[in-house]
Amino acid sequence: MNSAALSLKLLTRQSRSGALVMLFAGLVVATAALAAVSLFTDRVGRALERQAGEVLAADLVITGRERLPEEYREKAGELGLDTAEIALLSTVLFVGEESHLVDLKAVTETYPLRGQLKLADRLGSDQEETLATAPRPGTGWMAARGLRLFETDTGVEVDIGRRAVNIERVLTWEPDRGGSRFMLAPRLIIHMDDLLDSELLGPGSRVRWRLLVAGSESGVAEFRRWVEPRVEDRQDIETVAEAEADTGQALEQAQRFLGVAALTAVILAAAAVLLAALRYSRSQRDLVALLKAFGAEGRQILGALSLMLLWLALAAIATGGVLAFGAQTVIASILADGPAGELPPARLMPLVGSGSFTLLLAAGFALPPLVALRSVAPMRILNRSLDTRPGLAGGLWLVPILGALAIPVLQLGNLRLAMIVLGGSATLAAVLALAAWGAMGLSRQLSKRTRADWRFGLAGLHRRRGQGIIQITALGLGLMALLLLMIVRAELLEQWRGSLPEDTADHFVVNIQPDQREAVHEALVEAGALNLQIRPMATVNLIEVNGEPPPDHRWAGQTNVSWIDTLPPANRVIEGTFFAPDADGEISLAQRWAERTGVGMGDTMLFEAGGQRLDATVTSMREVEWESFNVNFFILLTPSAGESLPHQFIASFRLPEDAGPLRDIQQGWPNVSIIDIGALLDRIGEIIDRVSSAAQVVFFFTLIAGLVVLLAALEATRDERRQEAALIRALGADDALVRRGLLIEYGAMALIAAVLATGGAALTGWLLARELFEFAYRPSALLLASGFVVSFVLVVGSGWLGNRSVLKTSPIRILRAGG
Amino acid sequence: MGFSVDAPGGRLEILKDISLDLNAGETLAIVGASGSGKTTLLGLLAGLDRPTSGDIRLTGAELKSLDENARARLRKRHVGFVFQSFHLLPSLTALENVMLALEIAAFEHPRKRALEALDQVGLSHRLEHYPRQLSGGEQQRVAIARAFAGEPEILFADEPTGNLDQRTGEAVADLLFELNEHHGTALVLVTHDMKLARRCGRVDKIEDGVLTGGEGATEHA
């Protein structure tokens, strides 16, 4: 009989064997856990991305200094995508006697493609309307700040070039406000036709054009592929991933939390498969001995076993895939109004990944114990005691194992996160194995000095040295994964939520003139402002970098700079040294700005402002916590350089609800503008809340997988336990002795696994928080203590429940089965 | 005494109306073909299970009235075992395997007794070896040492030479009978090897669950 036929016979004849069912279940759990988590995180991830798309008001934006070619729009139309066009322009607006600079935004009818605008009928109105629409031609929507600046209200008519536009409504929110948290000039949105007819777009006008594209993911992706080679020098592509969103970091955090959940599922799945395969291979030894005795060659047996595993893995992938699909549908329906609003439909892509993962997992974790069956001695058929012990074959198996682990890493696309979770697990696995090995040596010594129950119990630990080490390692890893989830769920998310400090600034005051600074400061303190910071700011033109024209990036050119004598809070120098208070000719750059514009350490920059020129060299690079909502600047000059520039001051502060009104300040100094960003902070809070609830559901699923592993680990050695229990009962041991022996064995095992798993989870949690989530995690002693107790009770308890049959084993069994 | 189990095809009678007496120091061989019920009978006689009808008296105790734990107590004081597959715990050394049985029976000085027992089977030089480091014959000698170390009143042996080659089997059988005589233990030996069976004082044959007088039975009746 050839290997293929033999493999099918093995599979069908044993389809009701407990050990084979268990291996199948292990593989199904592996597939289902990873597939459900990745299907779901894929959907949530895309939904969150779509939400982030609101920041662009589109899925993809092409920007340019000139109007974007008609063929772009036509191509997008062909692909079934929606498009809209925006022109952005700073211009001076006259209303009666008043003239002020406004940030004009002209949009076509289809704007916004993603997200919505919020509008009010008049200043101070509490009634807001949420709309996804552009203003009609001849009408415009102005930010409240602009209306106050012009000392007017809705209904006023303004001239934009040669066009008159009626300010119909107050603009309170626009999704694509752009990278800066606040604009110096107030926003005015008008219809594109009005701008085109205004004659403002003459030569030399500094207009920025944006073509917004949105639609199906595949369509957008295809459009991107098509447009990329066509984009010219002065054009740029922005996608959600690259968008400078205030909420961007929050969304990244969200992906990371879900990533941790997926990776723990992977660890659990690997452990489950390994344990199930070990049990199965043990149960196959008689069969292999028999086949060999009948003349089957080692190679033929190896081929048959490998093929059998392949069939099993394929069946498991199909079953697990269906289960996963069902599970994630249920999860999604529970969260119908959940984490990211309406979820996009599930894609099959993650299933391909988790299918390959299961195959590699089977090859890496289940094949070695099966291949080891090759060495089963045919003599075993005559006397089981004469069989050699199969060893686990060597290092070649690392290849599929590494391959299997690489898949989730690639799927999640976050190497550091993967390194921390997988590296933490690998380290823990090594420590666990070492500890288990040590504990076995110790128990060996101890058992020499003890009486029957302890001798029997402790002997249980080192009875199957290799398997015992694997069992403790798998138990420990499973527990660690569960504890890590508990830590992430209970503490990391909570602490992240709390990482937006109570006194986060929610107001800005801009355009404070130098001679008003002291008085405004006093007035703000009087109004009850907390965490008040006032910083100087000048608007400069970047003329040259290293003697060359500056890079053509929207962040270069006209830009805001500040100066300070010490490193500001929420800033960290990552390269070079922050300049001394009395230094001259030095610049400190924010890393994000430097990356985008390509300006780096040691470069010389030449600025111009108010007829003055100023050059300085970059001597330090800063990492800025933008989410701190302090006033932060990309470019910091030395005080001596900055003070000579024409400048104003800008203040940031938090205003408690019971603080005095800011109206007095506004009336006292009409030139200053007060900006309220409370709505933005609320939005970030909302994102965190939604991520928490999404993560909980994902975590719950991983938890189930973890429990399966736990049971598999304890189940793995049950057959041998029953045999041994039968023997010592035949020798006259009573229930109590067998029970004490089991408790001693499980207690010792639980102790090692729980102590190390708790420590490992705390350490990995701390590392994750520090390296990825960027806040200091304080593991709570209570959580760790309860984690330890729960782990201990879980192992001993489930070991106890799973081995009730051992206690009930009749000693007659010893006459029926061989040793 | 009888024994039956519920099987898919209905109730299956494994042992029917068995009547058997064995006095202290007597040796009895039970012979029969595979599936005749001889191993089941051995298990019942040793108190590993209870008959479904009738009763068994072992060293004065009625087994039917005893629960599993009470029967375990009875076994550890009065009964020794030698199995076809040796049944040594693989993680314990030869010495520890013998000691474990003594400890279960709560004997004083288990180590000393175990050392003596292993010395009697000629394995003083193999004390710290694990079962996998011992030959089949040696493993069975450890099992014999374990069986006699507690000085049981009755020893049950299930095909004790069944897993051994002829020469080793004979040597092990010699040892078994020698120690049996030395300790004055009653012996119940289950085998299908007539040559081995004839070494017992009495041979009973079992066929389809029915015990019939065998060769020795007539001689010693």
Image (tube, coloured by chain):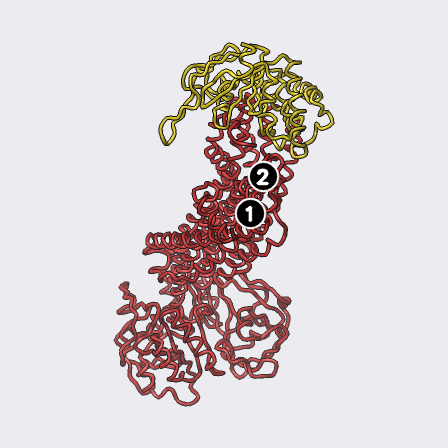
Nearer the observer: mark 1 or 2; the answer is 1
| Along the viewing direction, whichever of A72 and A612 lies nearer the viewer | A72
**Image quadrant in which you'd find residue A589:** bottom right
Q: Between marks 1 and 2, how big is the CA–CA gap?
A: 18 Å
Residue A68: where, in percent of width, then height? 40, 83
Label tally: 2
Closer to the N terminus: mark 1 or mark 2?
A: 1
Instruction: In the rendered view, tell whether residue A736 sits above or below residue A334.
Output: above
Chain A as rendered: colour: red
Instruction: In the rendered view, tell whether residue A254 sits above or below residue A816.
Output: below
Residue furthest to the right: B125
Q: Residues within 10 Å of mark 1 (few under 14, many from 20)?
A: many
| Along the viewing direction, whichever of A722 and A65 lies nearer the viewer | A722
Q: Residues within 10 Å of mark 2 (few under 14, many from 20)?
A: many
Q: Which of the numbered marks, if any, corresponds to residue B197?
A: none
- Subunit of mark 1? A
Say which residue label 1 marks.
A370
Residue A289: where, in percent of width, then height? 57, 41
Chain B as rendered: colour: yellow
**Image quadrant in which you'd find residue A147:** bottom left
Instruction: In the rendered view, tell whether residue B198 sits above or below residue A393.
Output: above
Q: Which of the numbered marks, if any, corresponds to residue A468?
A: 2
Amino acid on which disc 2 is placed? Gly
Tell me the SS state at disc 1: helix
Say if labels 1 and 2 share a chain.
Answer: yes
Amino acid on which disc 1 is placed? Leu
| Along the viewing direction, whichever of A498 and A255 lies nearer the viewer | A255
Tell me the SS state at disc 2: helix
**Split into 4 quadrants, where in the image is the C terminus of chain A?**
top right
| Along the viewing direction, whichever of A604 and A148 lies nearer the viewer | A604
